[in-house]
Structures are given as structure tokens and as C-alpha cells.
Image (spheres, rainbow, N blue to C red):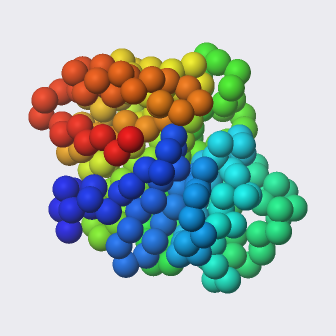
């Protein structure tokens, strides 16, 4: 599978609520899910804020054998919410693991100079390899050395500003790590405006294809 085919498998419900189709159905930070699909093979959470860890939403997509992945710092919240320990994989920044046969890397996700997502919380983004294509879902963060060190084919970058990178900073990250495809997220709902995607696309190097899913 090439990057363009992999990008076709990605949908964004809203904000940072991402679904990846294919042989396994993956969700990252499900939020404002309208339909009761119960089709998730794996659900990933980047951190514990309500718009990323939403029990009412993940319950609309999970099934009896759904696997869950979250930062180790979220263990109590996940277990207290009823996620079975045997179905839960805890990760910390820098970890490499395999979930349902899918290679997964956890990348530190934080704001270096803002209080919203402190580095000490050990929240994460994920590099998920789907049929040979590396997808980097950032989580809520600003540009960091850890993010700039990521190698990926598709970047899903939050660009709404305030809690995350701005469109300009998202483009900076894309230009630094040079994926084949960049997909902007985390704008136009709660924070950020639709025009942020215009700014992002204008500033991303023309050799990187920008695909909008919102």
C-alpha cells in the first residue's frame, strides 16, 4: 500500500477524532461520534482531556474484544471507567510495541511553554504502521524535538493554536520531518477556524501533499 492509498483509509469525524479503516479498524481519540458502529478493533487515546478521552463516544464504537491503548499516566482513569485490564496496553513516550499485529510507537506529546499539556504528564502521540505506511498522529502538542525526530509517511498535525500548534507551526513541523502527505487536524471545532487549513497548506512545502479531511 502506498501513502495515498493509506490516506484514503483515514477519516476525521471532527477535531482530532480519527478513524483508520483497512484490515483492522483503528480509532484515535473518538469524540462526538454520532453512530453506534461498534466496529473498533483498536482505540488509542493520546491524553485524558474530555475531547480526547470521551467514554460516551468510545462506547459507541467499541465491541467485546476491542483493544485499548493509552498513556501509562491514564491507567487509573481507564480502569475506573471500566476498560478491562487485559484489553489495555499502557505506553510511555519512546515505547515501541505491537497491538493486534500493528507496530506502534509512542511519541512524547506536550507544550514546552504552555500549561495545557505538561511534559511531566507523559502524554503521547502515536506512529502507527498500517500495511507498511507510517502514520504519525501527534496528539495535542507544539513543535518539539521529539516530534521533529519522527520519521513518517503521513503526518496528522493539530493546527488550531492555543492548546496546540498554530497553522504556521504545523507547517514548520511538516517541513522539518517531510512526510509524503500532511493532514491538518484539531481546528474548526472547539478551537481554530476553517481558514487555518488554508494557511497550513500555503506554508507547507509544495513537495508535501496536503489533504484535508475536515
Q: Residue drawn 21% across and 62% down?
A: 5
Which residue corresponds to the image point at 32% horizontal and 62% vertical from the top-left?
9
Going by the picture, which residue comes out furthest to the right?
Answer: 80
Height in image: 36 above or below 77? Answer: below
17 horizontally vs 9: left or right:
right
Query: Looking at the rendering, in which quadrant would you find the C terminus?
Result: top left
Residue 124: horizontal and vertical position, in percent? Answer: 58, 45
Q: Is 195 on the left or on the right of 8, as rendered? A: right
Camera sees residue 142: no
Q: Residue at x 72, y 34 (%)?
A: 120
Q: Is residue 37 left or right of residue 148?
A: right
Query: In this rendering, is residue 14 above or below 63?
Result: above
Of all residues shown, which one is farthest toward the bottom?
A: 64
Q: Position of residue 6 (x, y in %)?
A: 27, 61
On the image, which quarter does residue 63 sit in?
A: bottom right
Q: Where does residue 141 sit, x and y in percent of width and height? A: 54, 31
Asked if residue 136 shows in the view, the reply is yes
Task: Determine which quarter of the picture holds residue 85.
Answer: bottom right
Instruction: Give residue 198's position: percent from left, percent from top.
Output: 28, 24
Quick one: quadrant of the N terminus?
Answer: bottom left
- How many numbered discs? 0
Q: Residue furthest left?
A: 207
Up the image or down, 10 lies above or below 179; here it is: below
Amino acid at each position: 500500500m502506498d501513502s495515498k492509498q493509506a490516506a484514503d483509509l483515514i477519516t476525521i469525524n471532527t477535531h482530532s477524532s480519527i478513524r483508520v479503516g483497512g484490515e483492522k479498524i483503528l480509532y484515535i481519540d473518538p469524540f462526538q461520534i454520532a453512530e453506534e458502529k461498534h466496529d473498533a478493533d483498536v482505540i488509542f487515546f493520546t491524553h485524558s482531556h474530555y475531547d480526547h478521552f470521551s467514554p460516551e463516544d468510545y462506547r459507541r464504537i467499541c465491541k467485546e474484544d476491542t483493544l485499548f491503548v493509552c498513556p501509562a499516566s491514564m491507567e487509573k482513569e481507564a480502569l475506573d471507567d471500566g476498560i478491562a485490564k487485559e484489553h489495555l496496553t499502557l505506553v510511555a513516550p519512546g515505547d515501541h510495541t505491537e497491538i493486534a499485529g500493528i507496530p506502534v510507537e509512542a511519541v512524547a506529546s506536550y507544550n514546552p511553554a504552555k500549561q495545557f499539556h505538561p511534559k511531566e504528564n507523559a502524554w503521547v502521540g502515536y506512529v502507527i504502521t498500517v500495511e507498511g505506511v507510517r502514520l504519525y498522529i501527534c496528539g495535542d502538542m507544539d513543535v518539539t524535538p521529539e516530534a521533529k525526530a519522527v520519521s513518517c509517511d503521513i503526518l496528522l498535525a493539530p493546527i488550531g493554536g492555543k492548546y496546540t500548534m498554530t497553522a504556521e507551526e504545523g507547517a514548520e513541523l511538516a517541513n522539518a520531518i517531510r512526510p509524503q502527505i500532511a493532514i491538518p487536524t484539531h481546528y474548526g471545532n472547539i478551537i481554530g477556524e476553517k481558514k487555518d487549513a488554508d494557511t497550513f497548506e500555503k506554508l507547507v512545502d509544495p513537495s508535501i501533499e496536503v489533504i484535508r479531511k475536515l
